[in-house]
Image (cartoon, helix red, strand yellow):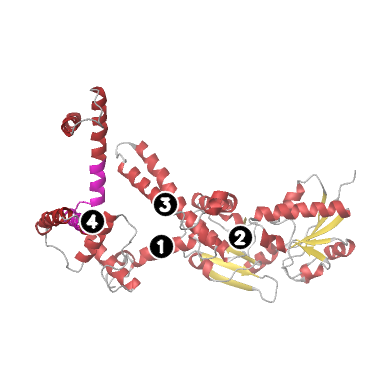
Amino acid sequence: MTLPRIVVVGLGPAGAEYVTEHTIAEIARIPNRYLRTARHPSAKLVTSAISFDEIYEAADTFDDVYDTIVDRLVGAATLHGEILYAVPGSPLVLERTVRMMMTDHRIDLVVHPAMSFLDLAYARLGVDPVEAAVTLIDGHSFAIAAAGITGPMLVAHAHADWVLSEIKLAAEGATGDEPVTILARLGTPDETITHTTWAELDRSVAADHLTCLYIPGLATPVAAETARLHQLTRLLREKCPWDQKQTHASLVRYLIEETYEVVDALQALDPNDLATDEALVEELGDLLYQIEFHAAIAEQQGRFTMADVAQGVHDKLVRRHPHVFAPEGTSLAVADDAETVKANWDEIKKVEKGRTSALDGIAQSQPALAHADAVQTRAATVGFDWPDVDGALPKIAEEVGELRVAAAAGDAAATRDELGDLLFAVVNVARHLQVEPETALRAATRKFQRRFENVEVLARERGIDMSAASLTALDELWELAKADERAGD
């Protein structure tokens, strides 16, 4: 049985002058014609052709695009017996659909050679790709394909700004001043060649479907792991029904949970036991995934990318560490102790944010004890504070008295207010004693939990029903539990 035939031709890198006579003859010979994309300078040579551009708009991923194109081509070949499939450049260079069809046993595939963008790129660069050992990389899989490579590299399919951002993100060890050449619309009247740096890679041009990059060398090899996580996050966002449903708002609870789990892992660290690092590595990874998730949502919305997040915090840290990065003699360039560094940080931040109040910018969603501590600390920076703990301690007794009065009067609103004032006063004392109140309260709660669980054990051993026991009996069990804990210490 004769298999349906698909004849593949390449339209060269640019205009009709780069298309071979053989390709033109095949276009004329085969009436049933298909174009991977009509967005190419030579696409007009393939008259009466059906293009697959609409698939790019409708599909969720490039894998879906390629699968759909191949299935439609096979169906068309089965219907007509023989069809022509025209692709940009050469069919043998970075053409996923052609590679997929090479192993498709449903068809007879004939691939004709053609001139690719590589010839023009190497001509413009003045580079012999064999002697220079240039690695050709697909921009869609840069992080994986370029892992371990420092260069030189020619990166194709750099067709959009988000692709440039992902490429930039993948090289975490780049210094930023490595040279990069951006080649756009080679062989067309609009050809441009832009010499820039790695730091400006995604800000130098507006990338389109005829854009590629030449990277002579990077300071360190491309790191794959962080970028692999980024790619996985995007894939889950595209493929997983649960991930697809999430929004910035719905993820808040998970961000908070993962943050607390990181804190638990930090508190469980034992300097003498490397095995305790495993929990911290896991929890930091979970927290990192939450950050990646929010960036992936924003990327889908066209708002920002993970590269923007990384670049933003990098640039902010540089600005706020003038004692490390600013030239000597610059204001704030000298900081010999941590207190000066913190004061400089706050001053720079105040100027950046245009803040007028010392309390501007305090996170309102943090836990109440931490929020109170932050407010008091910020107020203290402008001198609104007791000189030492002896000024803060009497406020506790004062607030206890006011709480007693409010509670005795049965005034629920006043009782709530006075209890808040008491807690605020306790936080103030903790701050003066340089004790983090959130940590102190958590430690006290864990201590209570241990002792209470010991009380439960003692009650079971003595056959005591705790819910029916007197307060005196429970207090005796509590004192025994405390004694057992001290003996264990």
Q: Residue at x 66, y 70 (%)?
A: 185
Q: Earlier in the sequence, mark 1 or mark 4?
A: 1
- Tag 1 residue: 314
- Tag 2 residue: 155
In terms of secondary structure, where does tag 1 sit?
Answer: helix
Q: Disc 4 vs disc 3: Cβ atoms closer than 8 Å?
A: no
Query: Around disc 4, counting alpha carbons within 10 Å, would you say few (fewer than 14), some (14 to 19), or many (20 or more)?
Result: few
Quadrant that contains the C terminus:
top left
Query: Which-is-in-front pick, marks 1 and 2?
Result: 1
CA gap between label 1 and label 4 equals: 49 Å
Q: Quadrant of residue 412?
A: bottom left
Viewer can see residue 335: no
What is the span of residues highlighted in magenta in the rendered image? 417-445
What's the magenta bit mostly, secondary-structure-wise?
Answer: helix
Q: Residue furthest front?
A: 410
Q: Disc 1 vs disc 4: Cβ atoms closer than 8 Å?
A: no
| Residue 378 forms part of the magenta stretch | no
Q: Quadrant of residue 381?
A: bottom left
In terms of secondary structure, where does tag 4 sit?
Answer: helix
- Tag 3 residue: 253
CA gap between label 1 and label 2 equals: 25 Å
CA gap between label 4 and label 3 equals: 31 Å
- Tag 4 residue: 412
Q: Residue furthest top?
A: 462
How far across and how far down the image is residue 273, in percent? 32, 36
User: Which three-letter amino acid code belongs to the residue tagged 1?
Assistant: His
Task: Between residue 435 and residue 209, name the one nearer to us.
Answer: 435
